[in-house]
Image (cartoon, helix red, strand yellow):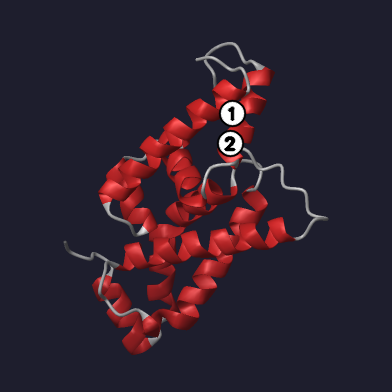
Amino acid sequence: MTDEDAPLVKTFLATGRVEDFEVLVERHRRNVFRIAIAVIGHGGESLAEDVAQEVFLRVYRRLHTFEHRSRFATWLYRLTYNCALDSLRSRRARPEVALAFVPAIHSGTQRDPFRDDALADCISQLPDGQRTAVHLHYWLGHTSAEIAGMLGVQPGTAKLWIFRARQLLARCLARKGVRS
Protein backbone atom coordinates (compact mmCIF):
# COMPACT_ATOMS: atom_id res chain seq x y z
CA MET A 1 0.00 0.00 0.00
CA THR A 2 1.52 3.30 -1.01
CA ASP A 3 1.27 6.43 1.05
CA GLU A 4 0.55 9.34 -1.27
CA ASP A 5 1.24 11.75 1.60
CA ALA A 6 4.70 10.35 2.46
CA PRO A 7 6.71 12.70 0.21
CA LEU A 8 4.83 15.74 1.52
CA VAL A 9 5.28 14.66 5.14
CA LYS A 10 8.98 14.07 4.55
CA THR A 11 9.40 17.47 2.90
CA PHE A 12 7.51 19.26 5.66
CA LEU A 13 9.58 17.58 8.34
CA ALA A 14 12.80 18.47 6.53
CA THR A 15 11.97 22.07 5.66
CA GLY A 16 9.16 23.14 7.97
CA ARG A 17 7.41 24.85 5.05
CA VAL A 18 3.90 25.77 6.17
CA GLU A 19 2.66 25.46 2.59
CA ASP A 20 3.39 21.72 2.64
CA PHE A 21 1.41 21.32 5.83
CA GLU A 22 -1.47 23.31 4.37
CA VAL A 23 -1.65 20.83 1.49
CA LEU A 24 -1.98 17.97 3.99
CA VAL A 25 -4.71 19.85 5.83
CA GLU A 26 -6.61 20.56 2.63
CA ARG A 27 -6.38 16.90 1.54
CA HIS A 28 -7.74 15.55 4.79
CA ARG A 29 -9.87 18.23 6.45
CA ARG A 30 -13.20 16.86 5.20
CA ASN A 31 -12.51 13.32 6.41
CA VAL A 32 -11.17 14.59 9.74
CA PHE A 33 -14.41 16.52 10.26
CA ARG A 34 -16.52 13.54 9.13
CA ILE A 35 -14.85 11.24 11.62
CA ALA A 36 -15.25 13.80 14.40
CA ILE A 37 -18.95 14.28 13.66
CA ALA A 38 -19.42 10.51 13.39
CA VAL A 39 -18.11 10.13 16.94
CA ILE A 40 -19.88 13.16 18.40
CA GLY A 41 -23.12 12.87 16.47
CA HIS A 42 -25.45 15.16 14.57
CA GLY A 43 -25.92 18.45 16.36
CA GLY A 44 -22.31 18.51 17.46
CA GLU A 45 -20.93 20.25 14.40
CA SER A 46 -19.36 23.05 16.42
CA LEU A 47 -17.62 20.57 18.73
CA ALA A 48 -16.51 18.51 15.69
CA GLU A 49 -14.96 21.64 14.17
CA ASP A 50 -13.10 22.24 17.43
CA VAL A 51 -11.89 18.64 17.39
CA ALA A 52 -10.70 18.98 13.78
CA GLN A 53 -8.78 22.13 14.65
CA GLU A 54 -7.23 20.42 17.68
CA VAL A 55 -6.24 17.44 15.55
CA PHE A 56 -4.39 19.57 13.02
CA LEU A 57 -2.67 21.52 15.80
CA ARG A 58 -1.49 18.25 17.31
CA VAL A 59 -0.33 16.98 13.95
CA TYR A 60 1.60 20.19 13.32
CA ARG A 61 3.31 19.94 16.70
CA ARG A 62 3.83 16.17 16.73
CA LEU A 63 4.33 15.11 13.13
CA HIS A 64 7.93 14.27 14.02
CA THR A 65 6.55 11.40 16.17
CA PHE A 66 4.88 9.76 13.16
CA GLU A 67 6.80 6.50 12.72
CA HIS A 68 5.66 5.65 9.15
CA ARG A 69 4.47 2.18 10.23
CA SER A 70 1.15 2.99 8.56
CA ARG A 71 -0.05 5.45 5.98
CA PHE A 72 -0.17 9.06 7.15
CA ALA A 73 -3.94 9.15 6.60
CA THR A 74 -4.44 6.10 8.83
CA TRP A 75 -2.39 7.74 11.58
CA LEU A 76 -4.26 11.04 11.17
CA TYR A 77 -7.71 9.46 11.19
CA ARG A 78 -6.91 7.34 14.24
CA LEU A 79 -5.71 10.51 16.00
CA THR A 80 -8.97 12.20 14.99
CA TYR A 81 -11.04 9.31 16.31
CA ASN A 82 -9.19 9.37 19.65
CA CYS A 83 -9.44 13.18 20.00
CA ALA A 84 -13.15 13.11 19.24
CA LEU A 85 -13.70 10.35 21.79
CA ASP A 86 -11.71 12.30 24.39
CA SER A 87 -13.74 15.42 23.70
CA LEU A 88 -17.02 13.55 23.86
CA ARG A 89 -16.06 11.79 27.10
CA SER A 90 -14.94 15.06 28.61
CA ARG A 91 -18.29 16.65 27.78
CA ARG A 92 -20.20 13.65 29.11
CA ALA A 93 -18.29 13.85 32.40
CA ARG A 94 -19.60 17.38 33.02
CA PRO A 95 -23.22 17.07 34.14
CA GLU A 96 -23.97 20.70 33.32
CA VAL A 97 -23.33 20.00 29.63
CA ALA A 98 -26.34 18.35 28.06
CA LEU A 99 -25.50 16.61 24.83
CA ALA A 100 -28.30 16.37 22.34
CA PHE A 101 -26.07 15.09 19.58
CA VAL A 102 -28.00 12.43 17.71
CA PRO A 103 -27.72 11.36 14.09
CA ALA A 104 -30.03 12.88 11.54
CA ILE A 105 -32.63 10.22 11.02
CA HIS A 106 -34.28 9.64 7.68
CA SER A 107 -37.13 7.19 7.50
CA GLY A 108 -38.41 7.55 3.98
CA THR A 109 -40.93 10.15 2.99
CA GLN A 110 -42.84 10.18 6.28
CA ARG A 111 -41.05 10.85 9.52
CA ASP A 112 -42.12 9.19 12.71
CA PRO A 113 -40.90 11.28 15.67
CA PHE A 114 -41.32 8.36 18.10
CA ARG A 115 -39.24 6.08 15.87
CA ASP A 116 -36.63 8.81 15.30
CA ASP A 117 -36.30 9.45 19.04
CA ALA A 118 -36.10 5.74 19.81
CA LEU A 119 -33.44 5.18 17.16
CA ALA A 120 -31.41 8.18 18.33
CA ASP A 121 -31.56 6.89 21.91
CA CYS A 122 -30.51 3.39 20.85
CA ILE A 123 -27.64 4.73 18.74
CA SER A 124 -26.40 6.83 21.65
CA GLN A 125 -26.16 3.63 23.73
CA LEU A 126 -23.87 1.85 21.27
CA PRO A 127 -20.19 1.45 22.14
CA ASP A 128 -18.11 4.27 20.64
CA GLY A 129 -16.57 2.22 17.81
CA GLN A 130 -19.89 0.74 16.74
CA ARG A 131 -21.68 4.11 16.89
CA THR A 132 -18.96 5.72 14.80
CA ALA A 133 -18.94 2.89 12.25
CA VAL A 134 -22.75 3.03 11.92
CA HIS A 135 -22.68 6.78 11.40
CA LEU A 136 -19.88 6.60 8.82
CA HIS A 137 -21.58 3.74 6.97
CA TYR A 138 -25.28 4.62 7.01
CA TRP A 139 -25.22 8.42 7.18
CA LEU A 140 -22.04 9.22 5.28
CA GLY A 141 -22.02 6.24 2.90
CA HIS A 142 -18.53 4.88 3.58
CA THR A 143 -17.68 1.24 2.94
CA SER A 144 -16.38 -0.95 5.72
CA ALA A 145 -12.93 -0.84 4.09
CA GLU A 146 -12.99 2.97 4.12
CA ILE A 147 -14.18 2.97 7.74
CA ALA A 148 -11.37 0.60 8.68
CA GLY A 149 -8.83 2.95 7.12
CA MET A 150 -10.32 5.98 8.83
CA LEU A 151 -10.41 4.37 12.26
CA GLY A 152 -7.15 2.46 11.98
CA VAL A 153 -8.71 -0.99 12.38
CA GLN A 154 -8.85 -4.09 10.20
CA PRO A 155 -11.68 -4.24 7.63
CA GLY A 156 -13.09 -7.27 9.43
CA THR A 157 -13.31 -5.25 12.64
CA ALA A 158 -15.26 -2.48 10.90
CA LYS A 159 -17.66 -5.05 9.41
CA LEU A 160 -18.07 -6.69 12.80
CA TRP A 161 -18.79 -3.33 14.46
CA ILE A 162 -21.53 -2.59 11.92
CA PHE A 163 -22.97 -6.11 12.23
CA ARG A 164 -23.02 -6.03 16.04
CA ALA A 165 -24.41 -2.50 16.07
CA ARG A 166 -27.30 -3.61 13.87
CA GLN A 167 -28.03 -6.47 16.28
CA LEU A 168 -27.92 -4.17 19.32
CA LEU A 169 -30.07 -1.57 17.57
CA ALA A 170 -32.68 -4.19 16.62
CA ARG A 171 -32.89 -5.44 20.22
CA CYS A 172 -33.01 -1.92 21.65
CA LEU A 173 -35.73 -0.85 19.22
CA ALA A 174 -37.75 -3.99 19.94
CA ARG A 175 -37.60 -3.21 23.67
CA LYS A 176 -38.97 0.23 22.85
CA GLY A 177 -41.79 -1.23 20.77
CA VAL A 178 -40.45 0.00 17.42
CA ARG A 179 -40.91 -2.42 14.55
CA SER A 180 -39.15 -2.22 11.21
> Which of disc 2 and disc 1 is earlier in sequence?
2
Quadrant hosting residue 112: top right
**SS type, badge 2:** loop
Residue 159 appearing in the image: yes
Q: CA distance from mark 1 to mark 2?
A: 9 Å
Kindly identify the residue that appears in the image at 41 percent across and 63 percent down. 78
Kindly identify the residue that appears in the image at 53 percent across and 50 percent down. 39
Q: 15 or 5: nearer the eye?
A: 5
Mark 1 residue type: Leu
Name the mark on residue 119: 1
**Residue 107 to residue 43: above or below:** above
Please state the horizontal and vertical placement of residue 170, each as a whole percent of the image.
49, 26
Name the mark on residue 103: 2
Name the mark on residue 63: none
**Residue 14 to residue 100: above or below:** below
Q: Residue furthest left?
A: 1
Tag 1 and tag 2, C-beta contact below 8 Å: yes
Quadrant hosting residue 74: bottom left
Please state the horizontal and vertical placement of residue 98, each as a whole percent of the image.
77, 48
Q: Quadrant of the N terminus?
A: bottom left
Please state the horizontal and vertical placement of residue 158, each as a whole percent of the image.
34, 46
Q: 57 or 23: nearer the eye?
A: 57
In this picture, residue 159 sits left or right of residue 177: left
